[in-house]
Amino acid sequence: MFALSESPAMPLFDNSPSFLSYFSDNEPVLAHLHKHGLDQEEFRRIEADMRIALMSTSFLSEHASEIRGVTVGVLQALAALGRSYIRREATVYALLDLKANDQSVLHDRVSRIVESVPHHVVKMDWIRKSALVAKSEDRSLLSPSACAKVYYQLLGLLLLTDRTYIAGNIVRSAIAANGGSRNIHKEWKFLGKSNRAMPQEHLDAVNQVICIFELPIEASGLVSSALTHSSWEENEGSRKNRNLETRKSSSLVLASLGSSVASHEYLLSAVKNACKNPPAVFKEQSLTQAHFVSSFEVTNLETGVLLSRSEKRIGVREKMSADFFKAIVGAIYLAKGCPDSLLADWPDEWDPVLTYIAPGALRELSPVDALVKTLRTIDLEVQDWQPEVRGPKHAEQFRFSLVLRSAVLDSSITVQGPLTSGRIALAKGSAAQVVLAALAADREDLPAGTSTPLADFIGDHLLSLTEKHEAASPGNRFNSVDVKARRCFRYVAVEAYSPLVGRHLQPHSGVMGRPEAELVRRYLDWLVGESGRVVPRHRISVPGVKGYLYTDIFDAFSFELIEVKSSARRNSVRLAIGQLFDYARFVSYRSLAVLLPARPESDLCILLASLGISCIYENEIGKFVRDDPKRFDTESSHASH
């Protein structure tokens, strides 16, 4: 069985099958790594891991029963990490060596470098000689893409085993082979120079970043450029801002660099988790604009950005926020000398940012944990897990069945998972995924005659749960639709915990984006805990309208309808208000609330209170505070006196 080592300098996987040595020649890869700084003693420490990184997916499929615990998903994760690292290094090289101080030029040059890798790697004999390939494959005829996958996997392994300097030497030699320099970490001062003739708010924001990250004072111009929007003009004329054009373009190229740096940190975090809990398939996900917007909000740098007068009147929009945050990350990365990772000395003041860009295991729950947490919110439980083992000891196969219990139906159902090779934990996770998939689906949407006993059981449970709580409901406060006489909704499970978040992509599905889902997870953990509180969501059938509306959260204990937003900005709050009033016409509820990642500005709190809507926000990671309308009514009455 394979297990991820706690120490990155130690082997990544334990107990590598000895038979792998018969299929590979380690001498070519050893010679190549030795040329780039890996000594023989270090190679012996990771030799077993190296064989896994050198596998093709066809070889793994051919020997799946003998290589337990390593999945195609692990190889995909290693390759994704290697590709991400190449993109980051290519961006630094294009920016500093080529001085591509134009975003479109930078993107073009980075794309050329990245796209050239397979054509460069296919010429490397050591890849062909050392790769583990299926019996049906001819090493001499491996395609550029097949060679590149092994190359990416090897880089990913070096990064995970704390040998980033070796990976860096390999990648930089490849860049050099394509006409680049081997020393890509050069001067960055051409990207921005310090200018004291700036608004004080801007200088304060620049100083805040310099102090928090302990950057050299010479980096002030770099950070200033990151916080300068392309629309900005010096109010007193261009005479005091002779570097305007440089600063405007610098912000954009810094954003490109910051995007590749933050994306690499995000992926590194996800891949570490994938190696601890090997997935059948690794689905590479990217940071979204919402991640960057939420990250910028918690930095409190918005007051220090430089905008033109016209843009300032409109305010900082979401795309601007995302670009500013990416540019700040790029500036910090350069000012720190392009470290292996920014997280090694990440400041405590910016810890909330890590929730979005490097959440690691906090972002991805195991299927079993995801199932248990999801079931808890809809009053279902797993009553028993029943393992089954088949086959001889050297080629064991596992299967789990689970007993699902519904108190409201006073009945149970046994769900059988698929037969799985590898670790027994994978079989348990596979059984959990069967139920998670059924929770995400809806029997009413299934073609006629294709419903399953599990889909019927879940559907009957949710319908009975809806009827049970509706019997004690306070009715609809607005009475615009008589929901008692004609109920047009029913409960469905929240999707925030599920690995299948984002499965439904139709606009009417109401599926939350990743940052919103992460916020909901933390809120449900805080609210539900071990209390057994029922917190589903609604699926609403709007009369005369095709499709459905989905609410975000419904606290069935307090009958509170909650709309979730990943941003506390005015546009997000206004959108949440509209959605709440739309949903409220069709469901029973006692109170309305919005759930936000931070406390909105006071004016928005007053707006929510005036409409009778509570504001729930996260004041620390995993801890939430409520501002209820009555509190603001009291404050207003005191203020009037």
Image (tube, rainbow, N blue to C red):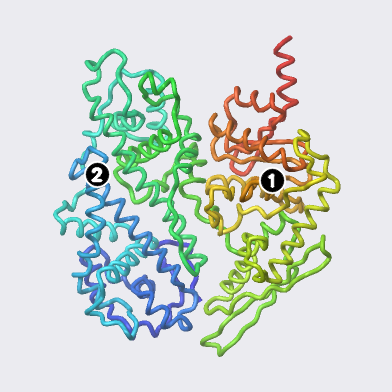
Q: Relative to the observer, which residue lies in front, 211 or 535? A: 535
Q: Is residue 184 above or below residue 402?
A: above
Res 217 seen here: yes
Quarter holding the C terminus?
A: top right
Q: Earlier in the sequence, mark 1 or mark 2?
A: 2
Q: Is residue 146 above or below residue 347?
A: below
Q: Relative to the observer, which residue lies in front, 202 or 168? A: 202
Q: Which residue is mark 1?
A: 543
| Left or right: where 234 falls relative to 174 | right
Residue shown at 58% from the left, 62% from the top:
366
Question: Which quadrant would residue 171 be assigned to in this image?
Answer: bottom left
What separation in Å lies between label 1 and label 2 (alpha carbons)?
A: 52 Å
**Which mark's residue is nearer the viewer, 1 or 2?**
1
Q: Which residue is mark 2?
A: 106
Q: Residue furthest top?
A: 641
Give the residue type at disc 2.
Answer: Leu
Q: Residue furthest left?
A: 179
Q: Residue furthest right?
A: 472
Q: Residue furthest front?
A: 544
Badge 2 element: helix
Residue shown at 57% from the left, 50% from the top:
511
Expressed as whole percent of the image width and height from the top left, the position of residue 441 reads: 62, 61
Q: Are marks 1 and 2 in contact (CB under 8 Å)?
A: no
Expressed as whole percent of the image width and height from the top left, the position of residue 634 reads: 75, 20
Badge 1 element: loop
Question: Which quadrant would residue 232 be assigned to in this image?
Answer: top left
Q: Is residue 362 above or below residue 65?
A: above
Residue shown at 22% from the left, 25% from the top:
243
Q: Relative to the observer, which residue lies in front, 453 or 53? A: 453
Residue shown at 53% from the left, 79% from the top:
421
Question: Which quadrant would residue 403 be assigned to in this image?
Answer: bottom right
